[in-house]
Amino acid sequence: MHIIITGGAGFIGSHLTEMLLDQGHSVTVIDNFSTGKRSNLPGSSNHLTVHELDICNFEGVLNHTKGADAIVHLAAIASVQASVEAPRETHAINLDGTINMLEVARIHDISTFVFASSAAIYGNNQQLPLKEDTPPAPLTPYAVDKLGSEYYIDFYCRQFKLKTTTFRFFNVYGPRQDPSSPYSGVISILMDRAQNKRPFTVFGDGLQSRDFIFVKDLVEILCKAATQQAPSGNTINLGNGIQTTLLELLSTVESLSNHKLDTSFEEPRPGDIKHSCADNTRLRQLFSYTPKTNIAEGLKQIWDYEELTP
């Protein structure tokens, strides 16, 4: 199969690219390299094509996607804080860019469309674990645009018979997550501080919790959704259903590094929620999902990767 991956040079996208190539598929990566890196991608492959291109450039993406079997749409400004500070700019990419890719799929008759949504659409709902039918309550422009994208995807599925799967990502972590990026997750920042014995700042009391899923577990599901027959029109939580607090993360990383971090506490950031955890019953039913990597194993893999990477 021929798969288009938007944001394919990014943290998640590059792992997905590797897995699809390993499975024998052809991959076209579309990435503007604002946060993605060429070094994340395989050095040479006859089955990989890379286009430096912004998804807001409709004519550009239209010209480079003909003949594909599926689109996995990952490209986005993935920072809640960035959307609070610059809502117009993030809207152009996160919602308008999604509509561009849906139109590309319609025009080229690309049958399968897989979309990376976010648990942020649930807002600060504390009726945990969060189910897919939990009423959305987005608190930030980022979450609003992800929810708006979901509505457009539902329309294209109904109106144009596009086969769609929307995954609401919970907190994804793993090797190649750039700690210097404003879009990076707390684990990559925490690991970087431990590797370099630098101070670490906790925003809030550290008791806030998240549902962390290892990147290789996540992209395995994306591969199945893109390449195998899956029921169309589903919105699915993509998380492990396990809550881990920031203080628990801190303790695990300190044990792993054999170093106690100089930790300070500051006020919570705007838009941050207190707790999040997925009900992943639908994921287990539709994709026979069983978590493979627990948090301690995942952190160890990151630690080993960082020690081996210059």
Image (cartoon, rainbow, N blue to C red):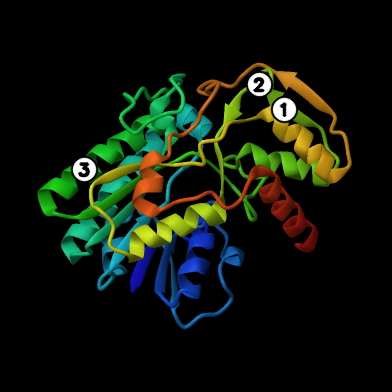
The residue pinned by badge 3 equals 154
Type of the residue with mark 3: Asp
Q: Crowding near pointer 2: few (<14 within 10 Å), some, many (20+)?
A: some
Work out how far the residue at label 1 is from the one at label 3, CA to CA, in angstroms. Answer: 39 Å
Query: Residue 286 versus residue 303: which sits nearer the camera?
Result: 286
Work out how far the residue at label 3 is from the one at label 2, CA to CA, in angstroms. Answer: 36 Å
Q: Quadrant of the C terminus?
A: bottom right
When the figure is inspected, residue 21 is found, relative to residue 280, above or below; the finding is: below
Q: Secondary structure at mark 2?
A: loop
The residue pinned by badge 1 equals 247
Residue 76 visible from this viewpoint: yes
- Quick check: marks 1 and 2 in contact, CB under 8 Å? yes
Type of the residue with mark 1: Leu
Q: Quadrant of the N terminus?
A: bottom left
Question: What residue sits 84% from the left and 44% below the top?
Answer: 257
Work out how far the residue at label 1 is from the one at label 2, CA to CA, in angstroms. Answer: 6 Å
Q: Which mark is residue 207?
A: 2
Q: Secondary structure at mark 1?
A: helix
